[in-house]
Image (tube, helix red, strand yellow):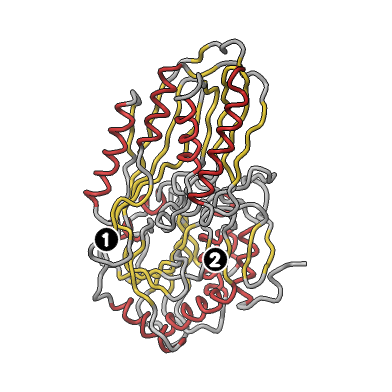
Amino acid sequence: MNPFNQLEPALVWKYFDEIRQVPRPSKRESKIVAYLQQTGKSLGLETETDEAGNVVIRKKATKGKENKPTVILQSHMDMVCEKNNDVQHDFDHDPIEVYIEDHWVKAKGTTLGADNGIGMAASLAVLASDNIAHGPLECLFTVDEETGLTGAAALKPNMLQGNILLNLDSEDDGELFIGCAGGVDTLAFLPYRAEQIPANYFWCNVEVKGLTGGHSGDDIDKGYGNANKILNRFLWQETKKTALRIAEINGGNLRNAIPREAKATIGVPNAFKETLRVDFNLFAATIENELGHKEPTMQFELNSETTPQHVIDEASQHALLNALYACPHGVMRMSDAIPGLVETSTNLASIKMNQKEIIITTSQRSAIDSAKHDVASMVESVFTLAGASVQHSDGYPGWEPNPNSPIVALTVETYQKLFGEKPHVRAIHAGLECGLFLQKYPHWDMVSFGPTIRGVHSPSERLDILSTQRFWKLLTALLESI
């Protein structure tokens, strides 16, 4: 039975159900682009797609609203594709399996894609509805928000005519966002030589898993553990006691997700086999003592492994472990201007290996452009000292808050009339596309809001049903008020 059949607003859940069945990994959005094109045409609406894959669907004003300002409803198509290791799921072909528990919509061992599927669903519901009074509408659906904001960056200055943009990519009911952090990714490439396996070694896999993970911006101040840092801490400590060798190391997946799982294939001389097991158990107890309240589902595993084909040369292993230990992760500075807001942070996101090098991906964010680049340089210096080559992405700008914004004032007023309380107006320590939009359309007046979503960018992602109803009421009332 369809879990959404009894939920309101029916149109929103209808489109969310359709969207969750369309694969839409970042940079591979062709199927969702085709879905949007077909949906726009089936509604008899003007539909345009640019060279990057961004889609705009336009709807004329309802009767009597023809002279009202054109409003842009904006959401992004792609979703973060994360799953638990024990879950079989192909994000390029399989629909997201969902269920309802209490008042939450959840996925079965994968990310849900409410970020930003619910924003897309709300936009399509507005387009399909015939009982909402509104001025001219442009619904903008962008590609590749999660891994590079390349859709927003590629947007042409003449594609849209509206002056007001409602970004539907926020995750907290009762909060309106009027600014966001900028960001840059820093990648380190550490070369290594594959050496022969030393004789008389015991081989095993050590794994840290079951961590919360979450959004590397919005959740960076929550105190969650970083699986890469935890695993590396054990390996670094153990090399001080034994002749430990690493054959393979792998942790994390996405630049914008706090890593939940990390694993290494390691060996120690047979004489240290029991020492390793004892040390690992003691280490697990230490970390559970430090993080157990924040990470109640954290797990540590050590299992015997067959002898690998090679190991990382000792010099590269030494450089890697020291660089990972020294690499900063977490909040670097809180905002002086906005109490409680993270100003600057960095995320040690992933560690991957190929046959020649180890690739470490990190992500830096800041509300202050110079601070963003300062932390990126800090990360660069750590890995340069380790002998790695380092590259920075082009990055993306922040969105500077406008306290005198007319659309923000109207949204606050509308929210208060609907729900009898004022929303919290604030900036967010995450990357929204709004900063890039302002480079092309500097005259736009913008606000961002959405329903409550928790566990974003992790398999614990869940969407609050009651807040989705409030989100829809606010959106439709705001459209009628503009």
Inspect this view and state whether residue 157 appears.
no
Q: Amino acid at mark 1?
A: Ser
| Residue 204 sits in quarter | top right
**Residue at position x 36%, y 69% from top?**
177
Q: Position of residue 326 (x, y in %)?
A: 35, 35
Q: Is residue 150 left or right of residue 284?
A: left
How dense is the environment of label 1, judged by Cα within 10 Å: few (below 14), some, or many (20 and up)?
some
Foreground of the two, 47 or 455: 455
Nearest to N terminus: mark 1 or mark 2 = 2
Vertical position of residue 302 compared to residue 453: above or below: above
Q: Is residue 431 above or below residue 130?
A: above
Q: Secondary structure at mark 2?
A: helix
Direction right: furthest residue: 1
Residue 410 point in image, percent of width and height:
34, 82
Q: Nearer the viewer, residue 231 or 167?
A: 231
Q: How many marks?
A: 2
Check residue 335 in the rendering and tell me which mark sits there, or answer none.
1
| Relative height, residue 410 to residue 425 (above, below) | below
Instruction: Return the mark for residue 118.
Output: 2
x then y, percent, for residue 355: 51, 21
Q: Is residue 441 visible?
A: yes
